[in-house]
Image: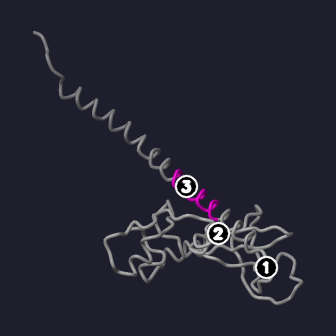
């Protein structure tokens, strides 16, 4: 007698094999997606810092005359982890302390050194608050939070302009935002 179909055991075996393959591949695909988002965020921070350096070069006289001083906090690998900010009118600064300006990502766009990720996208609202916070925005690609108000420190060190995007303060503000606007998710 000739058999024309599959047995229940054969179908179950194929389903188990497909399930095992999915169980092995899905976590790797998700990790790849997260790595891609992290790389996009690092690229965005680099882009913001380069825009801040251009801003500092264009505002060098203000930077040199600034009474705000910054002291980078560096880890064992030589990477800046945070920035201590103070004021000083002294012309001679302590070693590792530099004249600086604290600007926001918005300021860099206003100075034409950076462009919006989304510009004039909200067209169906007359609410000024919505237009202010959601119309023109820069987005963190890892979690879609608006980072327009995050700080960037532009400092003058050894006759050269440097920039540091304050990721720590920005991330903390995003975790605890209260007014629903400044660091809120991009809707």
Image vertical order of residue 25 relative to residue 172, above or below: above
Image vertical order of residue 46 relative to residue 98, above or below: above
Q: Is residue 37 left or right of residue 100?
A: left
Residue at image x 33%, y 38%?
A: 19
Image vertical order of residue 40 relative to residue 62, above or below: above
Separation (CA) of disc 2 from disc 3: 15 Å
- The residue lying furthest to the top in this view is 1
- The residue lying furthest to the right in this view is 92
Disc 1: which residue: 99
State the image quarter where residue 150 is shown.
bottom right
Q: Which residues are magenta?
A: 35-48
In this view of the protein, which residue sits in the foreground, 170 or 50? Answer: 50
Mark 3 surroundings within 10 Å by alpha-carbon count, few (fewer than 14), some (14 through 19), many (20 or more): some
- Which disc is residue 165 wearing? 2
Q: Point out the image quarter for the C terminus.
A: bottom left
Tell me the SS state at disc 2.
strand
Residue 65 spot, x, y in % from top left? 80, 83
Separation (CA) of disc 3 from disc 1: 30 Å
Sequence-first disc among 3 and 1: 3
**Magenta stretch holds residue 39:** yes
Separation (CA) of disc 1 from disc 2: 16 Å
- Which disc is residue 2 wearing? none
Disc 3: which residue: 40
Sequence-first disc among 1 and 2: 1
Tell me the SS state at disc 3.
helix
**Labels 1 & 2 near each other (Cβ < 8 A):** no
In this view of the protein, which residue sits in the foreground, 27 or 135? Answer: 135
Residue at image x 55%, y 76%?
A: 149
Tell me the SS state at disc 1.
strand
Mark 1 surroundings within 10 Å by alpha-carbon count, few (fewer than 14), some (14 through 19), many (20 or more): many
């Amino acid at each position: 007698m000739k058999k024309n179909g599959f047995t229940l055991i054969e179908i179950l075996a194929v389903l188990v094999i497909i399930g095992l393959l999915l169980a092995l591949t899905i976590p790797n695909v998700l990790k790849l997606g997260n790595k891609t988002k992290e790389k996009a965020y690092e690229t965005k921070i680099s882009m913001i810092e380069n825009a801040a350096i251009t801003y500092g070069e264009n505002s060098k006289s203000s930077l040199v005359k600034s009474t705000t001083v910054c002291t980078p906090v560096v880890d064992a690998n030589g990477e800046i982890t945070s920035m201590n900010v103070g004021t000083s009118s002294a012309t001679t600064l302590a070693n590792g302390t530099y004249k600086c300006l604290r600007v926001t990502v918005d300021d860099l766009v206003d100075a034409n050194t950076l462009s919006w990720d989304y510009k004039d996208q909200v067209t169906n609202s007359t609410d000024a608050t919505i237009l202010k916070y959601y119309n023109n925005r820069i987005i963190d690609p890892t979690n879609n939070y608006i980072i327009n108000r995050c700080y960037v420190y532009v400092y003058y060190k050894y006759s050269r302009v440097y920039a540091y995007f304050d990721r720590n303060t920005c991330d903390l503000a995003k975790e605890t935002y209260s007014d629903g606007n400044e660091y809120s998710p991009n809707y």
